[in-house]
Amino acid sequence: MTTPDTSDLMTRPPPGAAADLYVGEVMHRRSRPKAYEFVYRVFNIVLDIDRLAEPPARCRLFSHNRFNLFSFHDRDHGPRDGSALRPWIEEQLAAAGLSPAAAQVRLLCMPRVLGYGFDPLSIWYCHDAAGDLRAILYQVKNTFGDQHGYLLPVGDDSAGPSDHEFDKIFHVSPLIAMDARYRIRTTSPDESLAVLIRESDDDGEFLVATLTGERRVMTDGALIRQFLRVPFMSLKVIVAIHWQAIRLMLRGVKYTNRPQPPAEGVSTPPHPARKDAA
């Protein structure tokens, strides 16, 4: 495990900031058919989608829909056509009967770095007018350019972790079959970020992945430190995905051809939110 970066802990970002920076790690551990584990340093941002045009204070190295050292582009998320994200997420929530959850929406994602971006998992945390978390959209991308979102409600105990369990219907890795099921636990990011993903099939659990991070003030200094700490992170993510796949194939893991993605861009699994331990 790497040593946590504490260089930006002197000043905490204010609650409800337009943009927050989360510095941490991603971990994958697979138990079969071949065991492997890796841990990488990463950083993510959490954005209030209604304040995307509001630049973070003391931060000129991050831009919205413009080239910069770090940037966020609307066309990387939601409908992926460059249109505004607010109408799109409202439409998805309304279709699922979750309109109250559209009062405030925060998006967890990886930024583009020098114009290049790839984000395997972005998470939309949807809150009601009282500030309670009411729905989560897990938006998954694969390296073939496909994207699919799983939209699920959050139970009444919105202050605690949200546990969701649902069937996999979107192809992610050619080394993992489609006949699988996810269990995901997360909370709306505050001082820290924690996402736990478990994947299983009829023979039991075979993959555990985590994303963790600590909140930092999003300033030019903080962004430069992360660029030096994890240079060209977006490109590193793509390279790491393919490198791990090559290693597994060399060890005999079967390659699965990519099926057609789901016809609908967002699905609402029929399984209710769960509050049992993940």
Image (cartoon, rainbow, N blue to C red):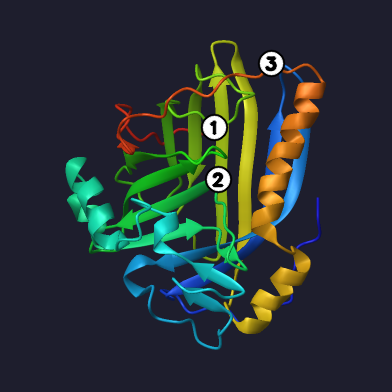
In the rendering, which numbered label is found on residue 254?
3
Q: Are marks 2 and 1 in contact (CB under 8 Å)?
A: yes
List x then y, in percent, for residue 127: 30, 58
For residue 202, side relative to residue 91 (left or right): right
Q: Nearer the viewer, residue 67 or 158?
A: 67
For residue 259, side relative to residue 37 (left or right): left
Q: What's the amino acid at mark 3?
A: Lys
Q: What's the amino acid at mark 1?
A: Val
Asked if residue 217 is positioned above or below residue 192 in the image, the reply reads: below
Asked if residue 72 is positioned above or below residue 90 in the image, the reply reads: below
- Neighbourhood count class around disc 3 (C-alpha, 10 Å): few under 14, some 14–19, many 20 upward: some
Q: Which comes sooner in the sequence, label 2 or label 3? A: 2
C-alpha separation, residue under disc 2 versus residue under disc 3: 22 Å
C-alpha separation, residue under disc 2 versus residue under disc 1: 9 Å
Q: Which comes sooner in the sequence, label 3 or label 1? A: 1
List x then y, in percent, for residue 56: 48, 81
Residue most extreme to the bottom: 58
List x then y, in percent, for residue 225: 73, 75
List x then y, in percent, for residue 14: 48, 79
Residue most extreme to the top: 203
User: Which residue shows up at 56% across the image and 21% down it?
Assistant: 200
In the rendering, which numbered label is found on residue 120?
2
Q: What's the amino acid at mark 2?
A: Pro
- Residue under circle 1? 172
User: Which residue shows up at 41% across the image and 29% down it?
Assistant: 261
Label 3 sits on a secondary structure element that is loop
Q: Which comes sooner in the sequence, label 2 or label 1? A: 2
